[in-house]
Image (spheres, rainbow, N blue to C red):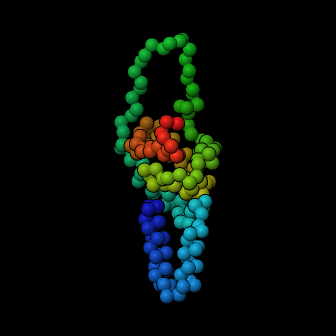
Amino acid sequence: MLVEKKRNHNQSTCTVLLDNRNNSTVFWKHVRNSARRKREEPRVKIDCDEWETHLSQRADWTCRQPVASAPQTTPHSETCTEVPELDGPVWEHDVREALVSLKSEKAAELDEVLVEYLKHAGDAIVPFLTTYFNHLNEHQHFPTDWGRSVIVPIHKGGGGGY
């Protein structure tokens, strides 16, 4: 969805530049404006229905079998560290806090959704995400993409020994 919208935006930008190639003032004005754009605010407006459709398609409800319990092992101590909060429902304030804490200007994951889009969707997307996460927890089926990721270290000057 985002790739298609970005492609359409790039096409319209190219069309404007080609149409104004004989008018250097307008042409360079568009080039300067394109170069000055910051990534802080996405230019593409996506309404809640489009988000719901996109995330529902990406959900892959039949992706996994229910999570099997871990094999029983003998603990090193007799203390049990259960955290009942992790088994409880996800609340809207939890989702809001998670959205606020996401770091911007990072590459999109396999779902092709930029963090900036989630942050700018704000309160409009929180109820859907809350329902979505609670559904996943209840049925113990998670999208297969959540188990895949590519992490590539980028070494800043020098070797990779630090």
* Residue 41: quarter of image: bottom right
How far from the left and from the top, in percent, is residue 152? 44, 45
Residue at x 38% of width, y 47% of height? 60
Relative vertical location of residue 51 with respect to residue 80 in this rendering, above or below: below
Question: How many numbered discs, if any?
Answer: 0
How far from the left and from the top, in percent, is residue 113? 49, 54
Q: Residue furthest front?
A: 158
Q: Is residue 80 left or right of residue 18?
A: right
Relative vertical location of residue 41 with respect to residue 132 in this rendering, above or below: below
Relative vertical location of residue 146 with respect to residue 124 in this rendering, above or below: above
Foreground of the two, 43 or 141: 43
Q: Is residue 104 left or right of residue 2?
A: right
Relative vertical location of residue 76 with respect to residue 16 in this rendering, above or below: above
Foreground of the two, 72 or 43: 43
Residue at x 58% of width, y 74% of height? 32
Q: Is residue 149 left or right of residue 91?
A: left
How far from the left and from the top, in percent, is residue 137? 48, 37
Residue at x 60% of width, y 68% of height? 36
Foreground of the two, 97 or 116: 116
How far from the left and from the top, in percent, is residue 68? 39, 29
Foreground of the two, 145 or 52: 145
Residue 74 in sight: yes
* Residue 28: quarter of image: bottom right
Quadrant occupied by the N terminus = bottom left
Residue 92 in sight: no
Residue at x 53% of width, y 63% of height? 46
Q: Is residue 86 left or right of residue 60?
A: right
